[in-house]
Amino acid sequence: MILAPGAVAPDFELVDQHGRTVRLADFRGARPAALVFFPLAFSGICQGELCELRDNVAMFADNAVELVGVSVDSKHTLRAWSEAQGYDFPLLADFWPHGEVAAAYGAFDAEHGIAARATFLIGADGVVVDSFATPKGEARPLDRYREALASLRSAA
């Protein structure tokens, strides 16, 4: 079960597709973050989802929310994918220890060794404002992100 609203988001330290270290603590007190866990780079549903987020990144920027993708892929895979698709937001490598951050959020599919499709909107105070997931093989609808962003505005 994924972390529910009201839970304190577990801190983490991962590298992005460019090898830069990203910590959840870096956002605390500064701005909210949307953590978007996805199974694998270069897979059809994941690519469709992240391209849709790329094309609608303004809805996150307009709400001063940092959009961050997370998968068990290596930083090298994530860099190749982000360059091929033009993703301008961080993609974090939860590569080793394998899936440790996804597991901390209740979003690790241990049977398949991948992150589940789960999203967490985390307030600047480090508390989960909204969270949602879809079953394997099902994309998250963009409207659900809009609802999550509205929850953030309501919580403020």
Image: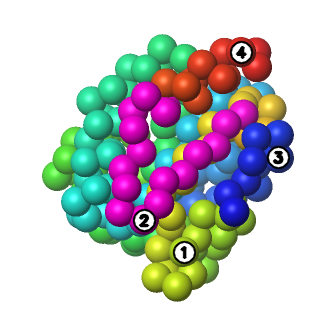
Measuring from the top left, give residue 144's x and y in whole percent.
Answer: 49, 33
Identified at 20% across, 47% down, the residue is: 85
Residue at mark 3 to residue at mark 4: CA–CA distance: 17 Å
In the rendered view, tell whether residue 72 sits above or below residue 65. below
Of residues 120 and 22, which is closer to you in this image?
120
Identified at 66% across, 23% down, the residue is: 151
Helix, strand or loop status at disc 2: loop
Residue at mark 1 to residue at mark 4: CA–CA distance: 32 Å
In the rendered view, tell whether residue 25 sits above or below residue 103. above
Q: Quadrant of residue 130?
A: top right
Q: Earlier in the sequence, mark 1 or mark 4?
A: 1
Measuring from the top left, give residue 48's x and y in whole percent.
Answer: 25, 48
Measuring from the top left, give residue 20's x and y in whole percent.
Answer: 49, 54
Identified at 43% across, 28% down, the residue is: 143
Residue at mark 2 to residue at mark 3: CA–CA distance: 24 Å
- For disc 1, the marked residue is 109
Helix, strand or loop status at disc 3: loop
- For disc 4, the marked residue is 154
Foreground: disc 2 or disc 3: 2
Helix, strand or loop status at disc 1: strand
- For disc 3, the marked residue is 7
Q: Amino acid at mark 3?
A: Ala
Q: Earlier in the sequence, mark 3 or mark 1?
A: 3
Q: Amino acid at mark 2?
A: Lys
The quarter of the picture where the C terminus appears is top right
Residue 136 is labelled as 2
Magenta residue check for 89? no
